[in-house]
Amino acid sequence: MLISVRWLNEYLDPANLTAEGAEAALTNVGFPIESHTERPDGDVVLDVEVTSNRGDCLSHLGIAREIAAATGRRFRSPSLDMPATGPGTAQESIEIDNQVPDLCRLFTGRVIRGVKVGPSPDWMVRSLESVGLRSINNVVDVTNYVAFEFGQPSHVFDLGTLRPAAAGGRARIVVRGAVKGEKLALLDGRTVELREGELVVADGARVVSLAGIMGGAETQVTPATTDVLLEAATWDPGTVRRAARRLGLRTDASHRFERLVDSRTIDTPARRAAAMIVRLAGGRLMGGSVESGAEPRPLRELRLRPARCRAILGMDIQAGEIEKILRSHEIGVSAGWVADAPGVGDEGVMACIIPAHRPDLEREIDLIEEVARTAGLDRIPVKETVSVRVSPPQRDEAAAREIARTLTGLGFFETVTFTFVSPKAAAPFLPAGMERVDVCDERRKAEPTLRPSMIPSLLACRRANRDHGVDAPAGVRLFEFSPVFAAAKDIAVERRNIGLIADVAPIAGQSAHDAAQHALRLVRGAIEAVVRAVAGDAAPVQIEPVAEAPMSAYRPGPFAGVRLGGEIIGCFGLVSPAVQREYDLDRPVVAAELGLDPLIAAYPPASRVRALPSFPAIERDVSLIVAEETTWARIESLVRSANLPMMDEDSGGPTGRAVQFVGTYRGAQTGPGKKSVTLRLRFRDPARTLRREEVDPQIATLVDLSGRELGAVVRT
């Protein structure tokens, strides 16, 4: 923000501020100076760095308020010597239809007739040139001057060019969203095509201004203009920002509206502009103004505890000084302090009324910051030593580290990829009933979609590794932690996930089918290792085959869901040939995705310590021939439901489980549509050594039960 020191002194008493004094005062209160330029006329221009939450300081008055509070000077508001109004009222000349009061909280119009457009006086030309503007004419220059004086952009229309809704009627102003395909010739000579929903000002027949950004060429003030409509309004910051960014139009007006111009601050600068136009260009100001919009919000009231202020800042500052500082920023403080909060001492609580031009003050801590920077940050004591308390890692971090440690131990490499993908890449990974979440950003034309899954990014990373000649004998394995996004019924859903991919690496002597099965088992093992690393060896993790994947990115058949404690936490399977071709990968890929939050919730695993067993166990292997579709989970569940009396449930030994999967065999001995599943059972008595005769009946019971429930027979 360019600030003229000469111009600045018009609002300070005494008006003897030097450039060095302004620079020192502003730097001390949080507005550093980026440049210091001396002009030929003796003025000095400072380029002040203004943070995005201080839109009120994008003006000479805003900066003058800060300097007055910092230096003890008196702040002087500019005079409002309103001229006598001519015959007639503004309502007789214009009508305003504000169709979007939620995006334009207030639109005002004043009418001035009989102006004489010409050059501006030298003092105004110098003022505008000091902040980088060129003089256009006395009417337009007033709006630019007031914008840099108050921070309130305004616009003047040639009233004679505004069309009424019907022949012979009043000029009509409509504030609305643009219709797709509408075009507008701008003041800078460009003609732009508008998108649906972008804010515009229209008359009875066409668009005449791009709201909050730039006016139209067809209604601009020219030397032939005699009657003008002075517009002062406020616009939704986000809507202005999106349109300005899309069109590449960053104007002084959009810069201010993007940082919020409050509807309650419009009237004074609008009256100032009307009075200056009459003074510099003549004419008659019609009585009143025409306004349309929403009801103004009440001023915000905050409470400030002086004791809390001292505790936060660590300096001895009394309530009287705090009140003085707040009043210097035009913050109203109640005459008596309200003692309605327990534990605040005799001073009680200050009731503070926030002025409309300070929307950045929202909480008590914001008021404390005002006190700190005005009183002087150098008053805050600095300790010679800093006490540090070492805390253990947060559970989220510790769980993520354990997962990463487990996966890297299994040969996976961690990646960090971009959150955005193309709509085409996202489509196969969207579950049924979910929609993409896209961003409206011109910089993200090719990839505007927040990824619904990490797998597209991991596949792109795998392709990049392949293109650079990176490979591994057992195939490349990658994983990543990241949020993923989707929308259901226009509500965006964000989840934290962990994604994994692993190549289906060729294995000597194995068919492509067997290699794919090996890769699926590898990823399944990695999933189980991750779950047990965070939830413990006894974690109830289940793998459930699913005939049809809910997403087209996976092949039907080799796909499964993952449950932890009965809750679905993820899935894994072979990536479909179509997706594989999309990433130009010559090897099939197994992909998995798990929810990170349920894994973190299960962390840390419970530690169980018990004495080592005193007597040996008896282990028996049983090979059951079952139908091909029978899962290991079904067999394990059946074994546990048998309640065999001497099964050794987790004795703390090296194997740790009473029922273990050994292997699967398919061949001539099993027959078509069958497989042989070998399981290992462990039996133990804590008080003595078991005999073979005690275990044989239990094995017989299990064989009989599996025959009835699963149709299984023992392979001999």
Image: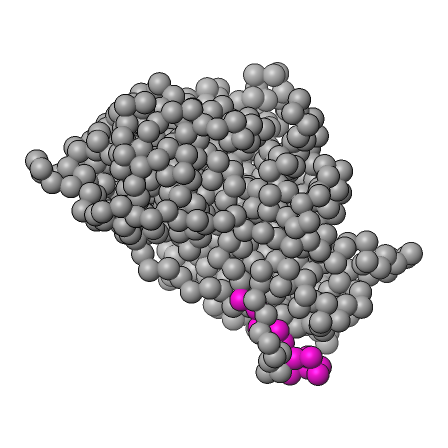
Above or below: residue 630 compared with residue 388: above
Q: Quadrant of residue 646?
A: bottom right
Q: Position of residue 356 (x, y in %)?
A: 48, 57
Q: Per the image, is 114 magenta?
A: no
Residue nearest the viewer, comparing 695 with 250: 250
> Taking 134 as reference, is 283 left or right?
left
State the extent of the magenta-drawn residues as a range: 342-353
Task: Report the colour scheme.
Answer: one colour
Q: Position of residue 489 (x, y in %)?
A: 31, 51
Q: Quadrant of residue 425?
A: top left
Determine the residue positioned at 70% across, 30% down: 36
Q: Main secondary structure of the magenta part?
A: loop
Q: Is residue 451 visible?
A: no
Determine the residue positioned at 33% across, 48% down: 84
> Taking 551 as reference, is 299 left or right?
right
> Taking 542 as reference, is 102 left or right?
left
Determine the residue positioned at 59% across, 56% down: 600
Residue nearest the viewer, comparing 150 with 26: 150
How many marks do you count on the picture? 0
Q: Position of residue 95 (x, y in %)?
A: 20, 45
Determine the residue positioned at 47% across, 39% down: 147
Q: Residue furthest right?
A: 384
Above or below: residue 290 compared with residue 190: below
Q: Is residue 34 visible?
A: yes
Q: Per the image, is 350 magenta?
A: yes
Q: Residue furthest left?
A: 167
Residue nearest the viewer, comparing 92 with 182: 92
Is the N terminus in the top left, top right, bottom left or bottom right quadrant? top right
Q: Position of residue 299 (x, y in %)?
A: 46, 64
